[in-house]
Image (cartoon, rainbow, N blue to C red):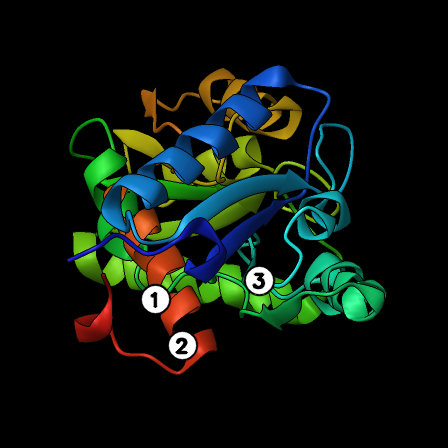
Amino acid sequence: MRSARLTDRLAVVLVAHGSRDPRAAESTHALARAVRRAHPSWDVHASFLDHAGPRPLDVLAALPGRRAVLVPLLLTAAYHGRVDVPAILDDAASLPVDVTLADVLGPAGLIDGLVRLLPGSFDGVVLAAAGTRDAVARETIMWAADALSARLSVPCVPAYASASPPDPGAAVSRLWASGARRIGMATYFLAPGFLYDVAVRSALGAGAVAVAPPLGDAPELVRLVAARVLAATGRSLHAAA
């Protein structure tokens, strides 16, 4: 069978927050490559809201006549998911591209990855996230911590590198006070960067014995991105190419 022309392929535009730390962009591009390998019929692009390039609109402008799905690489439905990413869709209305917006990622489907990336067994776990003042977003992270606790059968305390308490060090201290002695930090981060480093220093400084890496291009994340694309296009996982 003849391969589909590039213009017939679904374009998938991953939209990351962006960071001054080059490791973050490298991680996003690695995720884009992993999604592309898993779904070779898709034309997958990485883009960034800030700092790194290209910007989402620049990517969409280079796809005239195409069908595209924007996938927000956001783990909660906070400000960026509610305001910044939908604004891209509004701005793209003048472009000759058929654009559909997928849902943010969220923790469902990522618990297996959080467990797998933990570097050992622990009697207490901190789930560290970037942090937000948004109450709904914090509820999402608390849900993830509860789900992680249920999977590991140990207490799991959510913590934040910025914006809201407790910080990871305080969460480690809380677990220590409750009797945990081997405490690890799981990371609700997509990529390394300043806030991830803050969380790591805080947890280790308070006595955590090990920390997990960010999700990066974890297969669980690749599958979740694909599920968001398929839901946005009205297709099922069994229909994925």
- Rendering quarter of residue 144: bottom left
Q: Residues within 10 Å of mark 3 (few under 14, many from 20)?
A: some
Q: Circle 3 is placed at which residue position?
A: 66
Which image quadrant: the N terminus? bottom left
Query: Which dot, 2 or 3, sits closer to the camera?
Result: 3
Q: Nearer the viewer, residue 96 or 148?
A: 96
Determine the secondary structure under disc 3.
Answer: loop
Crowding near pointer 1: few (<14 within 10 Å), some, many (20+)?
A: many
Which residue does the numbered mark 2 point to in the structure image?
231
Q: Secondary structure at mark 1?
A: helix
At x 32%, y 56%, the residue is 4
Q: Secondary structure at mark 2?
A: helix
**Residue 137 occupies quadrant:** bottom right
**Above or below: residue 52 compared with residue 156:** above
Residue at 34% across / 66% down in the picture? 227
Instruction: Pick whichever, 56 or 122, lies toward us.
Output: 56
Residue 46 lies, in percent from the top left, at 56, 39
Q: Position of residue 37 (x, y in %)?
A: 27, 40
Q: 193 or 14, which is in the foreground?
A: 14
Q: Are marks 2 and 1 in contact (CB under 8 Å)?
A: yes
Mark 3 and mark 1: Cα distance apart in space: 20 Å
Name which residue lies at 68% across and 46% down.
62
| Spatial separation of the CA atoms under disc 2 and disc 3 | 18 Å
Q: Residue 130: percent from the left, percent from the top?
A: 61, 41
Q: What residue type is disc 3 on? A: Arg
Q: Amino acid at mark 1?
A: Ala
Q: Which residue is mark 1?
A: 227
Label 2 crowd bin: few (<14), some (14–19), many (20+), radius 10 Å: some
Quadrant location, the C terminus: bottom left
Q: CA distance from mark 2 to mark 1?
A: 6 Å
Tag of residue 19: none
